[in-house]
Every structure is written in structure tokens, then in C-alpha cells.
């Protein structure tokens, strides 16, 4: 156990802090949540600045265009950018956190050369086409069909809850290349494809979330032709390729947010002091407890990272323990916020209610809490599978 | 120099394994049940063996006859004691090493006014009370925890007496709680895999599985907070660790009881011993409200 930083890490932090101090004031104004082209341009602009300063793909391997930084440096990066109030990955989420790492781990040299540099530069945006109307938690039940025709797959089906589909250039698409049969269980027969979103036959229908804006969409695929060369991994091996992506999602995607939650709590304490509710011991203790819990969650991310550092790569199932605790704590945070603000939390001119609403997705997206508990119980604790 | 790293060093891993072996050999299930039947009376021989193994003198400097290790090692050792439900005023005696004669070697049993009121644990067998000039008189009172005899003293001292030891006392108690919380996960998982109903192990039912998964989440979050606080010696982190560890130990014992069904409600099963001891420890050194207030004060000062 050693929670001190090396000289090199301290220096890395100082340089980054310096750069953030100079760069953030130069950023343009944030676009409104409904202005998708504006949001994309804003997120791309930020990514480009990171790229030019040498911070893009920090922890990606060097042969994938990354900087080969240690997980601890990556953690410092997330901590510092969050602390400084830098923009989120936003529309670059899938490219940087799902599709990119998957291509880096499983793609050919040509595929990496084609797709990774534009992600790092912020030039191309990806979305994730996994879930389907009939395949949510039971993702392997997906039905979207891909039939081989010469050098192409011809794809028909539909995807749902596809975040950022409206502005994406590429979709990491899971398709069925082999129908389920007695010989082929549902986990086999799936392939992972990179689909251009402007291909003929792709229709995007935005879906409004409970927060009022269109954060995700349904994507209809009608005989869309995708070159076989766009397949990452072997044909019918897409499930394994996908699991690589999902473990990235649970392992590291929320690290910066934990720091953000501690900042949010600070804001809540200030608001409570200003409106007098801080004097209510029940509420004050509730906030104190949350402060302790987010402190522990921050330490847990460090722990997971040091484990990953030791095992040299892909985050493990420990991410499920973290996601269960974190998603619950985040919802509790915004419930406490509503208690601090009282009726004022109902006005949509502040950010609180929108954040409270978005917190509701945390126990659903990226594997529901029930599914995470199944994973913890069966894969960590070794409890038997039910019939 | 190493990077931020939660993994145990070789020595820390060996230390933990050594204590686990010692306790398995010297304080296994039979010894545990014998203590229960003896109303929590201490085995002074075992107390001396613990002393000889360095349990109490662990953090005393080598020059003072101690082992010269730090808080990170101490929490690992106390975690093991918590798993094994080892009885006695372990924390108070450990804190008394180098202060009260005989504590470091396990020759003396030292308790403390760590319950914040008139009740004192193990007073009947204590040679000293931490921070108190003399041994106070007290009347025995029946105790909810069969492994923690209680006395009520006539005039409890001002709270200040144990205050100097409070942060460390709370952290070491948190370590006992984390050990218990991890142990009840194991007990629940073992029972879930063995007991069959409706033609399958009950652990295959999702309702049972999900209880067990949440138990692990609680225990792991608390353990993380504990190790971090042991390394940083930060008062806020220590308060957070005690708070989360108390919750994990109490709630895990409750869920473990539920998973055991009727068996969990018996005297014979060990589950109630974990639950009752967790209740005692939750009252020791720093209660939930106090930890929350301390954290709230930190939050407020960080936010201005
Ligand atoms: C904000 C948001 C963004 C998203 N973005 C994307 C995206 O970009 N790309 C993408 O592909 N998907 C995305 N998703 C989809 C997400 O992955 C799914 O919603 C999720 O996997 C759950 O699937 P479902 O909605 O079909 O719910 P269901 O699977 O129908 O689940 C409904 C309820 O049943 C429970 N349940 C289901 N199976 C079990 C089981 N075996 N045991 C116990 N309980 C069970 C669930 O826990 C849940 O409570 C997004 C979702 C949200 C909310």
C-alpha cells in the first residue's frame, strides 16, 4: 500500500495544471443541449486541443497512436481536468472509451491506422449500436442480420438507445452473422463491424429522453452494405470482442465523474449554508456521509487502476463492484441536492434538476444494477447459476 | 519510489497470512464457542500469545521493544481479528502499548471509556482503563453481545479521557468491522452454495444472489476507505472509514442472517455473534452521527 506519487507523476500533474490554466479560458461558450451540431463542434474542438498538446489517447498504447501513459498518469489526467472544470468527452465518448480501445486491442494494423487517428484528433465521432428493441440486458439475443454478399455484408434490423447517433460518423455495430440454431448458441454468431452512418439505408430517429432533449436514437438499418474489411475480429467472434469493450466501459469511464461529484457536493454545502438548511443536522449528516462515500469511491477507482496496472491492461470485473456503488451514490447525491434546494430544485434554469434526471440512467445504462449484481455474485463470489 | 498502489507488499501479505494462521490455530470455531459459553471471559494465555506475536506492540518503535510497523499493517492485523471474532479490548490494549505497563506484551488487559457513556467493556478483567488514573468500580450488567461483558460505572469520566486516542481507536475498530463484514459475505456465500430448496442451491436464486453481491460491494467500499485512511492518516478519511465499516458490518450481518433462514436465528449459528459485536463496535470510539458531523465539517471547509 502506497498512496504517494512519484516525482515524474507530480511533474506530469504540474505541467497539465499549467496547460489547463492557459487553455480553458480560451474555449468558446458552451452550446445549448439541443444544438447537436454545436455540441459536436465544441467537443471536437476540445479533443483537438488535447491532441495538439499531446494529451489525446494518453493511456492508449503507443502503436495505437496513444502516449503509453501509466494508468496512474491517466488517473491524474482525469482528476486534474475535472478539477479545473474542463469539458467532458461528450460526443467523443464512444470513440475514446469503447470503439477506439476495442480497435486498438483487436483491430489489424490497417484498421488502427484508418480509425484511431481521427478519433484522437476529434475529427470523427462514433456511436455504439449494441442494444436492440428485443435485446437489452440479454444483449446476445440481438437479431440484426448481416448476410455476406461478395466483399460486403448486407445488414437489416434496428438498434435502439444509440447515444449521439445523430452526429456520429461511425457506428460500432453488433450484428448476427450466423443464425442461432442447436449448433450455434446465441453468444456465437455475432460479429463486430464499423458501419459508416452515412451509408444508404441508415435512418436515424431521435428519441427524447425524460430530460426533454434527444440524447439517443433508434437506428433503422435497411439493406445497408458494409465492407467485410470493416469487421474487427473474426467472423462470429464479436461477443468476445464486445466483452473487451464493455469492461473498458465499466472500468474507467466514470473516474472523472467521481471527482466531479465531490465538487458538486461542495456546491451543495455552499447552497445549504446560504439557504440555512445546513443547520438541519439530518441533512448536514446526510451530506457528510456522502462526502465520506465519494472519498471512498475515489480511492476505489485508484485501487482498480493499480490492479489494472499490475495485471497489465484490461480492467476486470472489479469494475462491477465500483459501478454498483457509484451509480447508487450518484442518485443519492442528487436526491440530497433536492433536499437542500427544496422547491427551488424544480426550476429548470439551474443545472440541478437536469443532473438529477440524468442520474436516473446510471443504474440502467452500461448494464443495469441487477445485471451487475448477477456478475458480482456469479463471477466474483462464485454462486451457482439459476435454472 | 512506487506509484499510487493499493496492493499489499510481500511483507504485508505475509503478515496478514501469519495472523490468519495464528488465529485459525489458536482461536478456531471451538475456542470461539467456548468463549461464548464462558460469557466472554478472556483467555489470558491467548492474550499473552497475542502479545508475543506483536499484536499489541505492532506500532511501537523497535527501540521501545515494539515491532516498529505502522497503521497500514495494524489494520490488516485487526481485520483478521475481526474475521475471527476474537474477543477482548483489543483496540484499547493496542493503544495502551508503551503507555500502560504490560500492555505491549499482553500481560495486561486494558479497556477504555470508548462507549462514550457509563458502560465499559471487559472492565471485570481489566488491569487498567486507558487514560484513567485508576481502575473505576462498576456493576456488571447483562450484555447484548455474549462476547463483550459490560459494566456500568457510577461516575463516567468527562469525554476528554479517550479523546486523544479517538482517531486511531476508530480506525482500528473500523478494521475489526471490515474483517467481520468480509467474513459474513463468505458465510452467506457458503450457505448459499450448500443449502438446497426447490431442487437447487438457494444461492442460485437471484434474490439471494443479489443480497450477497450487495454485501460484497459494501465490504469492498469500506475496506478501500479503511486502507486509504490507514495510509494517509487523514482524520476525515478515518471518519469515513469508521462510518462505512460500521454500516458494512451491521448490514452484512443482517443480510447474512437472512440468507441463513431459520438457522440464522439460532444461538448455534455464528451469525448473531457477528451482528451483536458489530453493534457494539458501531458505538465505540466514533458513532455514525459523530463521523457524519466530522465529515460535514470537512466538506464545509473544503467548499469555502
Ligand atoms: C442514457 C442511456 C444511454 C444508452 N446508450 C446506449 C448506446 O449508446 N448504445 C447502446 O447500444 N445501448 C445504449 N443504452 C442501452 C442500455 O445498455 C440498455 O438500456 C440496458 O442494457 C438495459 O436494457 P433494456 O433497456 O432493454 O432493459 P431490459 O433488459 O428490458 O431490463 C428491464 C429491467 O429488467 C431487469 N432485468 C433484465 N434481465 C434481468 C436478469 N437477467 N436478471 C435480473 N433482472 C433483469 C433489468 O435490470 C431492468 O430493471 C443506453 C441506455 C441509457 C439509459
Image (cartoon, rainbow, N blue to C red):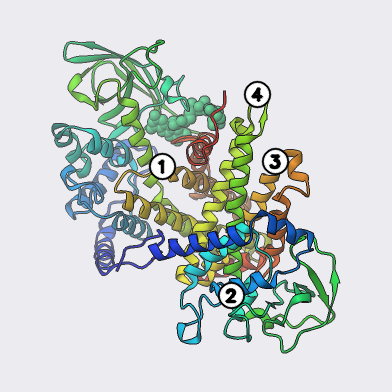
C-alpha distance separating marks 2 and 4: 49 Å
**Are marks 3 and 2 in one subunit?**
yes
State which chain disc 4 sits on: B
> What SS does tag 4 mark?
loop
Q: Residues within 10 Å of mark 4 (few under 14, many from 20)?
A: few
Q: Is residue A134 left or right of residue B89?
A: left
Crowding at label 2, few (<14), some or many (≥20) Cα neighbours within 10 Å?
A: many
Q: Is mark 3 within 8 Å of ligand 1?
A: no
- Mark 1, chain letter? A
Name the residue beneath numbered marker 3: B260
**Is residue A288 placed above or below A50 in the rendered structure?**
below
Q: Which mark is residue B199?
A: 4
Residue placed at 30% from the left, 16% from the top? Answer: A177
Q: N-terminal of the two: label 2 or label 4?
A: 2
Task: Work out how far the residue at label 3 is from the one at label 1, CA to CA, in angstroms.
Answer: 32 Å
- Closer to the observer: label 1 or label 2? 2
The numbered mark, 3 or 4, whose residue comes first in the sequence reads 4
Query: Is residue B149 something one can see in this rendering?
Result: yes
Report whether mark 3 lies on the same chain as mark 1: no
> A73 and B49: which one is in front?
B49
User: Can marks 2 and 4 be said to lie on one chain?
Assistant: yes
Q: Which residue is mark 2?
A: B51
- Percent position (x, y) of residue A185? 40, 17
Depth check, mark 2 against mark 4: the one in front is 2
Amino acid at each position: 500500500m502506497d498512496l504517494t506519487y512519484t516525482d515524474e507523476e507530480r511533474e506530469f500533474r504540474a505541467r497539465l495544471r499549467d496547460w489547463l490554466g492557459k487553455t480553458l479560458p480560451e474555449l468558446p461558450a458552451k452550446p445549448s443541449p439541443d444544438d447537436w451540431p454545436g455540441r459536436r463542434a465544441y467537443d471536437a474542438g476540445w479533443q483537438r486541443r488535447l491532441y495538439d498538446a499531446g494529451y489525446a489517447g494518453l493511456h492508449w498504447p503507443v502503436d495505437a497512436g496513444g502516449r503509453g501513459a501509466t494508468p496512474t498518469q491517466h488517473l491524474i489526467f482525469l482528476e486534474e481536468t475535472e478539477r479545473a472544470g474542463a469539458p467532458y468527452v461528450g460526443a467523443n465518448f464512444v470513440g475514446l472509451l469503447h470503439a477506439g480501445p476495442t480497435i486498438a486491442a483487436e483491430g489489424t494494423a490497417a484498421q488502427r491506422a484508418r480509425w484511431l487517428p481521427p478519433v484522437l484528433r476529434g475529427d470523427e465521432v462514433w456511436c455504439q449500436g449494441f442494444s436492440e428493441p428485443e435485446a437489452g440486458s440479454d444483449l446476445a439475443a440481438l437479431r440484426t442480420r448481416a448476410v455476406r454478399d461478395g466483399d460486403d455484408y448486407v445488414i437489416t434490423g434496428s438498434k435502439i438507445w444509440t447515444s449521439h447517433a445523430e452526429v456520429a460518423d461511425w457506428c460500432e455495430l453488433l450484428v448476427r452473422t450466423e443464425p442461432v440454431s442447436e449448433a450455434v448458441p446465441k453468444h456465437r454468431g455475432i460479429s463486430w463491424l464499423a458501419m459508416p452512418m452515412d451509408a444508404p439505408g441508415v435512418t436515424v430517429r431521435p428519441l427524447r429522453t425524460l430530460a426533454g432533449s434527444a440524447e439517443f436514437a433508434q437506428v433503422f438499418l435497411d439493406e445497408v452494405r458494409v465492407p467485410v474489411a470493416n469487421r474487427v475480429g473474426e467472423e462470429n467472434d464479436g461477443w468476445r470482442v464486445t466483452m473487451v469493450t464493455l469492461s473498458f466501459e465499466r472500468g474507467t469511464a466514470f473516474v472523472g465523474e467521481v471527482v466531479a461529484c465531490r465538487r458538486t457536493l461542495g456546491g451543495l454545502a455552499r447552497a445549504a449554508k446560504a439557504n440555512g438548511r445546513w443547520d438541519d443536522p439530518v441533512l448536514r449528516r446526510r451530506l457528510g456521509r456522502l462526502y465520506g462515500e465519494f472519498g471512498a469511491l475515489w480511492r476505489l477507482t485508484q485501487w482498480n487502476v493499480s490492479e489494472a496496472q499490475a495485471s497489465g491492461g484490461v480492467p476486470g470485473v472489479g469494475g462491477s463492484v465500483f459501478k454498483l456503488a457509484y451509480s447508487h451514490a450518484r442518485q443519492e447525491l442528487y436526491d440530497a441536492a433536492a433536499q437542500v434546494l427544496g422547491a427551488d430544485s424544480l426550476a429548470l434554469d439551474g443545472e440541478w434538476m437536469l443532473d438529477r434526471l440524468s442520474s436516473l440512467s446510471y443504474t440502467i445504462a452500461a448494464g443495469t444494477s441487477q445485471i451487475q449484481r448477477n456478475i458480482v455474485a456469479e463471477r466474483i463470489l462464485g454462486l451457482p447459476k439459476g435454472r | 519510489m512506487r506509484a499510487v498502489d493499493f496492493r499489499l507488499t510481500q511483507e504485508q501479505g505475509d503478515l496478514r497470512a501469519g495472523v490468519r494462521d495464528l488465529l485459525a490455530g489458536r482461536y478456531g470455531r471451538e475456542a470461539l464457542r467456548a468463549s461464548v459459553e464462558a460469557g466472554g471471559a478472556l483467555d489470558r494465555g491467548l492474550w499473552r500469545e497475542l502479545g508475543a506475536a506483536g499484536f499489541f506492540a505492532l506500532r511501537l518503535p523497535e527501540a521501545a521493544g515494539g515491532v516498529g510497523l505502522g497503521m497500514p499493517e495494524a489494520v490488516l492485523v485487526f481485520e483478521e481479528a475481526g474475521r475471527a471474532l476474537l474477543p477482548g479490548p483489543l483496540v484499547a490494549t493496542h493503544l495502551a502499548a508503551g503507555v500502560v505497563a504490560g500492555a505491549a506484551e499482553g500481560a495486561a488487559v486494558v479497556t477504555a471509556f470508548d462507549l462514550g457513556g457509563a458502560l465499559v467493556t471487559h472492565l471485570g478483567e481489566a488491569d487498567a482503563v486507558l487514560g484513567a488514573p485508576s481502575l473505576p468500580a462498576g456493576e456488571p450488567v447483562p450484555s447484548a453481545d455474549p462476547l463483550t461483558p459490560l459494566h456500568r460505572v457510577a461516575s463516567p469520566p468527562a469525554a476528554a479521557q479517550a479523546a486523544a486516542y479517538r482517531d486511531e481507536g476508530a480506525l482500528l475498530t473500523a478494521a475489526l468491522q471490515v474483517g467481520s463484514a468480509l467474513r459474513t459475505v463468505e458465510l452467506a456465500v457458503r450457505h448459499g452454495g450448500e443449502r438446497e430448496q426447490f431442487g437447487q442451491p438457494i444461492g442460485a436464486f437471484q434474490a439471494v444472489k443479489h443480497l450477497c453481491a450487495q454485501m460484497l460491494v459494501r465490504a469492498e467500499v469500506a475496506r478501500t476507505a479503511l486502507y486509504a485512511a490507514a495510509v494517509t492518516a487523514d482524520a476525515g478519511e478515518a471518519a469515513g472509514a469508521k462510518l462505512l465499516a460500521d454500516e458494512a458490518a451491521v448490514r452484512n450481518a443482517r443480510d447474512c442472517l437472512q440468507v441463513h433462514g431459520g438457522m440464522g436465528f439460532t444461538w448455534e449459528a455464528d451469525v448473531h455473534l457477528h451482528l451483536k459485536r458489530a453493534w457494539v463496535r458501531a458505538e465505540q470510539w466514533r458513532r455514525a452521527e459523530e463521523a457524519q458531523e466530522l465529515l460535514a465539517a470537512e466538506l464545509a471547509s473544503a467548499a469555502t
